């Protein structure tokens, strides 16, 4: 009996839980929140470059215009939209709505899918307008 107690984990861990959409949505919301800090530094860099002068602004635009720069900006756009939609979901919960198991699962899936669609749509519109 004492040996069985020693082999049990002290607390549940990710290895025990089966990933479900609401749990993954919560994890993604936290990760995108952290990623937005990094993206905001990039926005500040771009604004500082614009205030510094044309040669430095052109350099920063060249960095953002590269393949890697565009991938980072695309990821930042997705993180921003995903985090915003997750925040709206939390805002809805603050008013006491959407706690039903099946609805919250569908909402978590819809949040993820909608963030992808809106990101692509925003980038397509951006390229068409440009």
Image: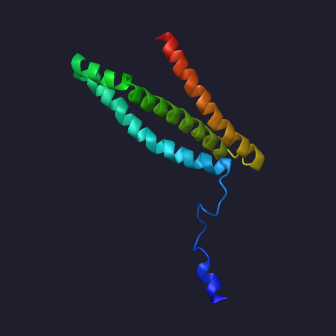
User: Residue extending furthest bottom?
Assistant: 2
Name the residue: 59% across, 40% down. 86
Q: Which quarter of the figure has residue 110?
A: top right
Q: Residue at x 64, y 34 (%)?
A: 113
Residue 111: image x %, image y %? 64, 37
Residue 92 percent location from the top left of the image: 66, 41
Relative to 24, is 71 above or below?
A: above
Whether residue 123 appears in this view of the structure is yes
Decide if residue 97 is in sight here: no
**Residue drawn 65% across and 83% down?**
4
Outermost residue to the front: 67
Horizontal and vertical percent position of residue 115? 59, 32
| Nearer to me, 40 or 128 | 128
Q: Position of residue 17 (x, y in %)?
A: 65, 60
Where, quadrant-wise, is the N terminus in this rendering? bottom right
Give residue 71's quadrant in the image: top left
- Work out whether 110 lies above or below 1: above
Left or right: 46, with 123 as reference point:
left
Left or right of residue 104, residue 129 in this image: left
Residue at (50, 46) in percent of width and height? 31
Q: To which quarter of the image does residue 52 belong?
A: top left
Of residues 34 and 123, the one drawn nearer to the viewer in this rendering: 123
Number of marks: 0
Q: How is the image coloured?
A: rainbow
Left or right: residue 88 versus residue 57 is: right
């Amino acid at each position: 009996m004492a040996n069985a107690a020693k082999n049990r984990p002290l607390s549940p861990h990710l290895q025990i839980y089966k990933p479900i959409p609401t749990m993954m949505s919560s994890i993604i919301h936290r990760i995108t929140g952290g990623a937005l800090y990094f993206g905001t530094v990039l926005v500040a860099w771009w604004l500082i470059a614009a205030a510094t002068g044309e040669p430095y602004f052109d350099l920063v635009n060249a960095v953002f215009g590269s393949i890697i720069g565009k991938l980072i900006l695309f990821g930042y756009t997705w993180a921003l939209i995903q985090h915003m939609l997750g925040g709206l979901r939390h805002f809805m919960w603050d008013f006491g709505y959407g706690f039903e198991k099946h609805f919250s699962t569908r909402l978590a899936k819809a949040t993820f899918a909608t963030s992808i669609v809106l990101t692509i749509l925003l980038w397509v519109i951006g390229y068409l307008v440009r």
